[in-house]
């Protein structure tokens, strides 16, 4: 019966559909779209360049690294630069993992923000802020891309989320909470975090293995073979995104509560 219905639809489609598209040496009939198709893009990855605009543009257009979009630190008239078509793969993620998938270049759009990153000072790292104009342009781009590709909130991430052992961008000053309040990306419910804390002090130590198991369920690259230093980097990447006030990578009750609240809201990766 289903085959008969399909054949009838095929005949009807041939009665009122435009002629096939003529290309060089062949024609393409667009009447039927496969139900099994899905967009290439599933993840939006945010970076900072650690260089000024001229150096960033040179690197991203002449070297073995690229990104789909480059947003100046102070965009003029809301203008950003598209360097790679969204339909094509850009080389921005490197070795990476997110929510069970590797080779994130294959399934993502890479967005570079012109920002110097950090500098070493006598009191520690000094991070450079992002301008409101830059974030406004980024917000519009993320909203548009997330809508067009139906990107889940938890799949709008930073480079440090998908490569925590190698990367720290976009850093602790990136306004993840502000974007979440605008409907972009994941963020835990404050009330749920308080409930998960269950009266414990935020800085109360917890078992690192228990916390890392939560991070793995949420989407981070966590393996049994990780050294203590690698474990700390994974925790720090999570904290830099969801609790930037303290991203030392220490396993504490507040970090555990945030991870549990995120899993409550968005579910486990696998």
Image (cartoon, grey):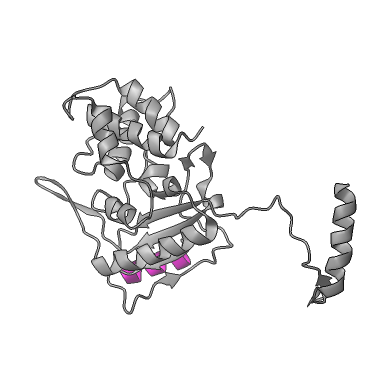
Whether 37 is drawn above or below 166: the answer is: below
Whether 257 is drawn above or below 29: the answer is: above
Whether 58 is drawn above or below 163: the answer is: below
In percent of width and height, residue 269 lies at 48, 35
Nearest the viewer among 267 and 93 is: 267
Q: Residue at x 31, y 67 (%)?
A: 136
Q: Quadrant of residue 14?
A: bottom right
User: Is residue 84 covered in magenta?
Assistant: no
Would residue 221 be seen by someone viewing this image from the given angle? no
Nearest the viewer among 138 and 235 is: 138
Name the residue at the bottom extreme.
77
Nearest the viewer among 85 and 10 is: 10
In percent of width and height, residue 92 lies at 46, 54
User: Is residue 62 covered in magenta?
Assistant: yes
Q: What is the number of callouts on the image?
A: 0
Magenta stretch, residue numbers? 53-63
Relative to 88, 262 lies left or right: left
Would residue 194 be seen by someone viewing this image from the given angle? yes
In percent of width and height, residue 197 lies at 24, 28
Relative to 159, 241 lies left or right: left
Name the residue at the left extreme.
122
């Amino acid at each position: 019966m289903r085959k008969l219905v399909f054949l009838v639809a095929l005949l009807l489609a041939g009665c009122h559909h435009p002629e096939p598209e003529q290309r060089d040496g062949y024609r393409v009939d667009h009447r039927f779209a496969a139900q099994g198709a899905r967009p290439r893009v599933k993840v939006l990855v945010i970076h900072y360049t650690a260089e000024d605009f001229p150096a960033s543009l040179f690197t991203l257009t002449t070297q073995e690294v690229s990104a789909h979009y480059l947003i100046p630190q102070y965009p003029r008239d809301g203008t950003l630069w598209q360097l790679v078509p969204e339909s094509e793969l850009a080389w921005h993620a490197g070795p990476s993992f997110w929510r069970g998938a590797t080779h994130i270049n294959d399934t993502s759009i890479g967005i570079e923000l012109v920002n110097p990153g950090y500098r070493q000072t006598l009191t520690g790292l000094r991070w450079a802020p992002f301008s409101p104009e830059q974030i406004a342009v980024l917000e519009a781009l993320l909203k548009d891309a997330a809508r067009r590709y139906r990107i889940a909130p938890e799949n709008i991430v930073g480079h440090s989320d998908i490569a925590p052992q190698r990367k720290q961008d976009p850093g602790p000053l990136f306004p993840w909470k502000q974007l979440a309040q605008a409907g972009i990306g994941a963020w835990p419910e404050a009330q749920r975090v308080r409930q998960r804390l269950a009266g414990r002090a935020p800085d109360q130590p917890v078992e690192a293995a228990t916390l890392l198991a939560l991070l793995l369920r949420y989407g981070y690259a966590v393996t049994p073979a990780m050294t203590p230093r690698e474990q700390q980097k994974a925790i720090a990447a999570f904290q830099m995104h969801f609790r930037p006030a303290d991203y030392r990578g220490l396993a504490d009750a507040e970090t555990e509560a945030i991870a549990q609240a995120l899993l409550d809201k968005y579910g486990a990766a696998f």
